Image (cartoon, grey):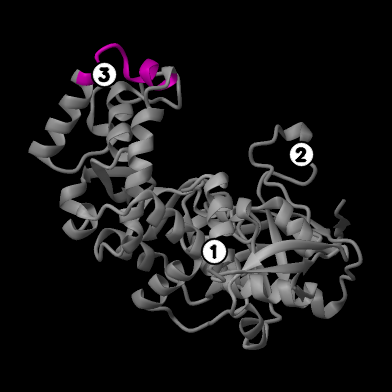
Amino acid sequence: MLTIANSQARRLFLDRHALGERPGHALTHEDVLALVRRLGFVQLDSINTVERAHHMILFSRAAGYDRALLAALHHDHASLFEHWTHDASLLPIEFYPHWHHRFRAAKERLKHPRWQERIGPDAAKVIARVRRRIREKGEVSARDFEDKGEGAWWGWGPSKTALEFLWRTGELAIARRDGFEKVYGLAERIIPADLRAARPTRRQTVDWAAREALARLGFATPTEIAKFFDLIEIAEARDWARAALRRKEIVEVEVMGADGAAKPALALPSIEADIAALPELDASTRLLSPFDPAIRDRKRAIRLFGFDYTIEVFVPEKKRRYGYYVLPVLEGDRFIARADLKAHRDEGRLEVKGLWLEPGIKFDKPRKAALEAALDELSRFTGTVTLDAAALRRPARAG
């Protein structure tokens, strides 16, 4: 069985997450689409404390990223579609046929009492009314309905609930976002007909999702494979792995962790050659979104990097260890710090509210200069031209 050293595992994992290099040239639509395809999806999030997750994820990987490119790929080029992975995400449009399974599952999940409570006793009438309005008048958002803001759950009224039901079950699609508000339209007017008509079997989708996940993770357990797109069940991933091993389509490997312990994983047969062919790792300093896919799996981040990170946005203020919106700081193949940042857009100021160094990290002049350069670059991207980095003079220790 092949044993993968921790240094090799880090490099491969970062390469598969497009964090092994960082082009600075201006990106084209094709570049951004290729980057989304490489990642598999880009998570959407409304929190704008520093920068919205989808933009920050792409900027962390390419300094020449322009926000307008992602919007155009979704809204104008129809190269991306919006739906759920583990959360709301933008995905390559060619993935759409496999989401039919999610659409069918949603029809069952939306029978839950919480949804029935939100939509009210006349669910069929509400859904029919919303469907008729979109068919007759075109794309709509929740604000176009008189019952907007009603309801106890995030202000969802019956019409908003109907819109979400029709979207999650595939009858509607997200045509665009106005600000961060969804604009819904008929899927038949947004999604190409051949992709809507395609109906892969469950077995085909399990095989597709497992292979695509493993290719993007580099190595993984069945649980990690299933959770990548959150499209298949863990049991399905286990069954797939057993069959793929018998067919010698994947191999078993041991991956050394940051603590020196080995953990079994699955990989494509080309993994040894893939590691040998990895380009030289970019050693620059970069800040990642708290929602970055490279750190979404907390256990994996601890195992590979010895980096224990939790998003504290949803943690009550008194229970936070670090801060509301803390960005991991990546230097080459290791996480060296975490920084609590806030963009004061009305003042044009990016504030470093706190900085915590990881154990064993020395904050010498070259490292400080590299972090300051990364913060300067981020401040320009967020439009906060002034960097308030007093916290860099008094960094604390994480842990």
Q: Nearer the viewer, mark 2 or mark 3?
A: 3
What main secondary structure does the magenta stretch of the protein show?
Answer: helix
Sequence-first disc among 2 and 3: 3
Q: Secondary structure at mark 3?
A: helix
Residue 2 seen anywhere in this rendered image of the structure: yes
Residue of label 1: 244
- The residue closer to the viewer here, 70 or 382, is 70
CA–CA distance between discs 2 and 3?
Answer: 41 Å
Up/down of 30 relative to 273, above or below: above
Sequence-first disc among 3 and 1: 3
- Residue 123: numbered disc: 3
Q: Amino acid at mark 3?
A: Ala
**Residue 117 part of the magenta-drawn span:** yes
Residue 332 seen anywhere in this rendered image of the structure: no
Up/down of 369 relative to 263, above or below: below
Q: Secondary structure at mark 2?
A: loop
Q: Secondary structure at mark 1?
A: helix
